[in-house]
Amino acid sequence: MSRSTRPSSSLLRAAAVTGVAALTLTACGSGSGTGSSSAGSGEIKVGLITKTDTNPFFVKMKEGAEKAAQSEGVQLMTAAGKFDGDNAGQITAVENMVAAGVKGILITPSDSKAIVPALAKAKAKGVLVIALDTPTEPQNAVDALFATDNVKAGQLIGEYAKAAMTGKAAKIATLDLAPGVSVGVQRHDGFLKGFGATDKDVVCAQDTGGDQAKGQTAMENCLQKEPGINVVYTINEPAALGAYTALKAKGREKDVLIVSVDGGCTGTQAVKDGKIAATSQQYPLKMATEGVKAVVTDAKGGKKSGGYIDTGVTLITDKAQTGVTSKDTAFGLENCWG
Amino acid sequence: MTATSTPPSPPAPYADLKAPTTARRLLTQPTTGPLAALLLACVYFSFSTDQFLTGGNFSLIVQQVMVVGVLAIGQTLIILTAGIDLSCGAVMAFGSIVIAKTAAQGSLSPLLAIALGLVVCGGFGLLNGLLVQKIPLPPFIVTLGMLNVAFALTHIYSEEQTVTNLPGPLTALGETFPLGRTDITYGSLVTIALFLLVAYALSNTGWGRHVYALGNSPEAARLNGIRTSRLTIGIYTVAGLLYGIAALLLISRTGVGDPQAGQTDNLDSITAVVLGGTSLFGGRGSVVGTFIGVLIVGVFRNGLQLMGVASIYQTLITGVLVILAVTVDQISRKKAR
């Protein structure tokens, strides 16, 4: 019985698999719209590799790169890791882009150290490598870095919180990113520097991974540990909103100062709504735009970008403090990402 | 009580009687479809990009899939017994950190560090096998638990730090040698050799026939005099050792010991096995199919990237192909009744 049916079942398998493969290929080939079909051989190709496909920060970055690529008349290739921290996925993307003949690669490294050997190989093949948002370790493993000064971003909200707390004894909680991730460490340290505090003054420090649900849990636990907390530093606005939810449940949302970093549109709106006192806004779109331009300039034989290029950071709040420079949420919402 | 540890599967007990005699046929048949899909994809990408059809690019694809490929060999063996291993990526990550850290921080010579990594990964496999066979617990649960154990140990032992400055022998498999105008990594050769070795063992040895018999029906296999308990534990242990080799390949490819590695590799390996035509219900399939399955994923990822298609479409296509492959498996099973 099985003898007679098996050949036909394998034929069925072959037909079905190939059929759908072909269908999907044609479907996405026509639907991608990222200039895949118009890839002329003489055209300059630029690669953008983000940490993930789904984080709004990287979505905005991609949007910036696409616009810049269009106005510069070059082809943009994009790729991303499967999750934040997917180093192997980023290595694969680097290799494929080098194989595709890109002139330059813009990358937000998921793992600052682990990506370095792969980038060195790309550089050895003459590809300009630029880090966006997150520096590599060592920083000179790439040709240039376009990023927010995260120490400064933290310092701005630290100074703001200091001014807002004048005359009150501060009990600080910090909702951080994750151990050993440079962005989180720099923002945290910058905040403490701006506030004029040290880690000893922090009554509760918790990692959140920048996640809203984890931010809420962390804040709940911090309040359990030390109910008198009145200043909360958060790594980003999702963590800040999680903290707000936890504080609101305790009826403490009015008398606790929450400050954050990022400047996403949801986060900036939360500043406008008074949930977050202030945030340091960064500009992923600008990072990508400048990055694409740098690759094009280099490919056309122009001046090679090098070193660290600060893409700027702005303190956004509607309750300005004297002595601290800031812009209001109207500006923030106009320039937000996500 | 029977010694079975498999989750309840659709009833097909009478298919078991002819399993030993048709084992050889089963090895080759289910790969026809996947092979056709692979070739079609290759032809498509050859026409749509200039860079696809080059020796260097094929060498690259093999390098990119070798880690998941070796994991998928172990996964195939376990799935052939109607089991599943969710812990493979995490066990590999732990093995890679053990190797990288003990060697890079000077406490062990590189070769001893590699041996330790293999022993650790093999130990995880042995433990999986014992829990599945002796208690017995469902493989899904055992390996889900082990996934978390290995994941946690990786992060505890690494202290969340990426291990850099690895001594030469650890990355030797990432070195290349020229073949014509193409550079091939030694790791690719190791991967292909492992696939050939296990394919031979499955199709041409008594052990291989026992694996298929066990997958078709543990009870029938036991009644036929196969020591199913020892066989099952052995399969999980061999799979663990393969994860140790994958750990070494991973280190050689990335040049670092990375605690974040392998997080989705368990699912990627299952994807490769399923795309390769191996049945999740056990007893049908082959590692040759798995090799084709691994290549399908690698070729799509590489080809779409060369075309400039965003990576999210790779995920979309892989998902569709997986559902399709299982559907075809189910239909062909029904027809075979």
Image (cartoon, rainbow, N blue to C red):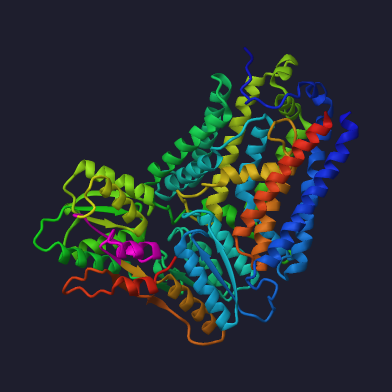
In the image, residue A15 lies at what x, y percent? 83, 49
Q: Let me know if residue A156 is in the magenta part.
A: no
Q: Is residue A92 above or below residue B258?
A: below
Q: Which sits in the foreground, B73 or A40?
A: A40
- Residue B310 in the image: state x and y as whole percent: 61, 64
Q: Is residue A268 magenta?
A: yes
**Image label count:** 0
Does the rendering let one see residue B178?
A: no
Judge whether residue B278 can be spotted in this image.
Answer: yes
Up-down relation of residue A232 to residue B324 (above or below):
below
Q: Position of residue A20 (x, y in %)?
A: 76, 53
In this view, the residue in front, B145 or B249, is B145
Name, please, the residue furthest toward the top: B1
- Answer above or below: position of A15 versus A285: above
Which residues fall within the magenta stretch? A255-279
The residue shown at (47%, 55%) is A84
Residue at the (33%, 70%) spot, across then down = A149
Q: Residue at (40%, 76%) from the top-left corner?
A: A307
